[in-house]
């Protein structure tokens, strides 16, 4: 009995030392090291890719948002949002770009509700941008899997350029040049597709005008 108790106590002390060592390494030292490296070399991304105006954060380049006209009745939650012609518009979002309601519709390509929604969106986008329905890109009428994607295709961005230029009384060439500056290529040259971050594009558009 006298030999068992010290032996058990010794095992507990070893376990306690291992717990303290792992806590210091993985719970304190490692997070501090990673945070330090991120802040030193990738501070903008590490802090949420925030976009600022006069030093005040106004949006995150990682999360899409609506660019809509003010509601006629701010207290009416059922009133649909009306897109503002002065801004480049994002792709549709099932959750309304609400960060707490991220997700897709989960409707299949043959679902009649989805087909009707796509056709209605195509007609609405064509009328809003003043283009033929056949020229409306697919991402203008389909939502992303997360419902928070800030990216649109270059084709959709260029399609909207004329409407934005007219609404802001800017030269079309100037607006198209701004779009060209925001076209991002494929990751590593082969992953994904070319895209335009519409939140960052509108942020620079506001500064342009």
Image (cartoon, helix red, strand yellow):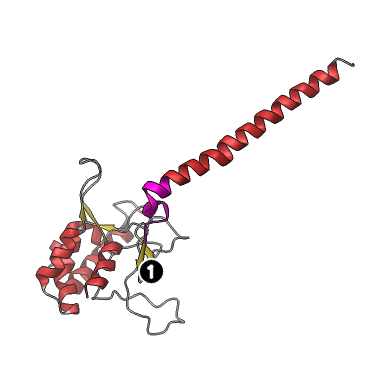
**Residue 168, picture quadrant:** bottom left
Quadrant of the image for the N terminus? top right
Residue 111 vs residue 87, the one in the foreground: 87
Check the image and report above or below for 194 versus 1: below
Residue 162 is situated, as x and y percent measured from the top left of the image, at 14, 71
Residue 123 vs residue 4, the one in the foreground: 4
Residue 89 included in the magenta stretch of the image: no
Residue topped by disc 1: 55
- Give the magenta-colored segment's residue range: 38-50
In the rendered image, the residue lying farthest to the right is 1
What secondary structure is the magenta-colored segment mainly? helix
Please tell me how crowded label 1 is: few (under 14), some (14-19), or many (20+) other residues with Cα within 10 Å.
Answer: few
Left-right relation of 127 to 62: left
Residue 184 is situated, as x and y percent measured from the top left of the image, at 22, 52
Check the image and report above or below for 109 versus 50: above
**Residue 5, picture quadrant:** top right
Left-right relation of 158 to 109: left
Residue 6 is situated, as x and y percent measured from the top left of the image, at 83, 20
Give the residue drawn at x 57%, y 35%: 25
Whether residue 106 is visible: no
SS state under label 1: loop
Check the image and report above or below for 1 versus 140: above
Residue 130 is situated, as x and y percent measured from the top left of the image, at 14, 73
Check the image and report above or below for 112 versus 24: below
């Amino acid at each position: 009995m006298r030999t068992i108790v010290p032996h058990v106590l010794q095992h507990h002390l070893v376990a306690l030392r291992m717990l303290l060592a792992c806590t210091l390494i993985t719970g304190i030292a490692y997070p501090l090291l990673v945070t330090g490296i991120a802040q030193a070399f990738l501070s903008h991304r590490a802090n949420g890719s925030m976009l600022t105006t006069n030093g005040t954060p106004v949006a995150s380049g990682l999360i899409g948002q609506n660019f809509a006209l003010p509601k006629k009745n701010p207290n009416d939650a059922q009133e649909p949002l009306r897109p503002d012609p002065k801004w480049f518009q994002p792709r549709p979002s099932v959750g309304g770009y609400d960060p707490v309601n991220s997700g897709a519709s989960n409707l299949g390509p043959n679902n009649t509700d989805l087909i009707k929604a796509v056709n209605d969106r195509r007609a609405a986008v064509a009328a809003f941008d003043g283009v033929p329905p056949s020229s409306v890109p697919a991402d203008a009428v389909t939502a992303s899997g997360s419902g928070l994607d800030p990216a649109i295709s270059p084709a959709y961005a260029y399609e909207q350029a004329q409407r934005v230029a007219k609404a802001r009384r800017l030269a079309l060439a100037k607006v198209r040049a701004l779009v060209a500056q925001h076209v991002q290529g494929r990751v590593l040259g082969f992953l994904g597709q070319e895209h335009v971050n519409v939140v960052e594009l509108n942020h620079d558009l506001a500064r342009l005008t």
